[in-house]
Amino acid sequence: MSPQRVHGIGREVFRVGKGAVLMREGETGKCAYFVLEGRLLVERDFGGKKEIVAEIGVNDIVGELAILDDEPRSATVIAAEDSTLLVLDKSRIHALIRHHPKIAEVVLKLLCRKLRTAHYAAHKNIDLQSPECWRRIGAILCLCAEVKKAPQDLFISFFDNIKALTDIPLQRIGLVLERLEKTGAVRTNGEQIEFVDQAMLRSFLLHCNEEFIEQDFPQPTPSKQYQALQVLTQYCRPVGEEMKWVDLPRKGIVELLASSDLWKTLSPAMQMQRAEEMLQCLTESGAIAFEISSPETLRIYFDKIEAYPKPKQEIEAFQTMKAVLFRPVS
């Protein structure tokens, strides 16, 4: 839709429809746009792949570099919705600046703020190796997917919430979705999220909470129970003896579980709490039992441990997601 002059407001004010391209990356810039109503998206080409890097809202300006120099446009700008814009023509701005120093001061302050914001966003160090970062992303995506939305609306909802609830620069959103797609948790098509595997994401969030979050956890996951039992088998079974059970001090078992790699990212106090919770869970499963004669002694049954089913799919899914999501940004 081509720009339409809004009659009765002024010759510098235009109304554009959703999808209108206001400027293209590489073109020579002759003006900037001040948004009176609506919303614009700033898109850049990264090695042939186009990504949204910023959003311009009401009372914001885009294309401001054209006021300062004659360099090509650094990005493409598209109207995200029907918008009303004030066109800041380069020659008129320069004339105003020459004859009205106070206007020049306002314009320069606006440009400095924009450039400072752009510089900060470009150089902000967001750790995409952080479990906390991906835990937050996964939680946002799950919440967005719970509300039944069309693929395009789901993408916009996810985009808006990521921008509002995290410090992830907008130019990283494409990388975030690309990694999620590699795990199989989502399927995208352009600016649409066609599929979200909520069960996989919830399982991932559950494991992240258990391994990385310093807070109470309701119950150990099946895969963590299995890993704890393997620790007991490795360190508690007498070497060279075919014993079906062994008695050990309760305190020693708790310390063993706490000092293993099951919760190595947590504080020592939280590791002890997790170990206590795990021991309670394992006694309920029957793999471990209290000795009647000594409440502080526990009997570990190796045949019951060996019969405990390995949650192979759950373990492999979490390990795959960690390998894909937590890897360094190249």
Image (cartoon, rainbow, N blue to C red):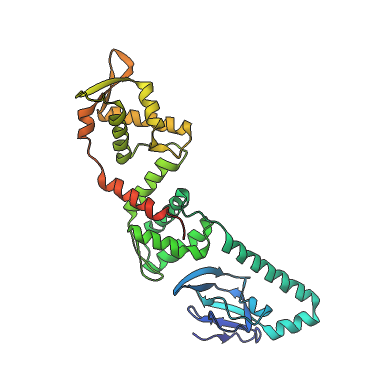
Q: Is residue 6 above or below residue 274?
A: below
Q: Residue furthest front?
A: 240
- Looking at the image, residue 249 sits to the left or right of residue 157; the answer is left
The x, y position of residue 262, in whole percent, is 38, 37
Q: Is residue 89 above or below residue 240?
A: below
The x, y position of residue 123, in whole percent, is 58, 61
Residue 187: tell me if it is visible. yes
Give the residue at x 32% y 34%.
Answer: 228
Give the residue at x 67% y 66%.
Answer: 113
Q: Nearer the viewer, residue 139 or 82?
A: 139
Q: Locate residue 83: give its quadrant.
A: bottom right
The x, y position of residue 314, in whole percent, is 29, 46
Q: Nearer the viewer, residue 48 or 1?
A: 48
- Looking at the image, residue 127 sits to the left or right of residue 244; the answer is right
The x, y position of residue 236, in whole percent, is 30, 26
Residue 157: tell me if it is visible. no
Q: Residue furthest top?
A: 293
Q: Nearer the viewer, residue 125 or 85?
A: 125
Question: Count of labels shown?
Answer: 0
Q: Is residue 192 above or below residue 300?
A: below
Q: Locate residue 224: give its quadrant.
A: top left
Give the residue at x 29% y 37%.
Answer: 226
Q: Is residue 191 above or below residue 217?
A: below
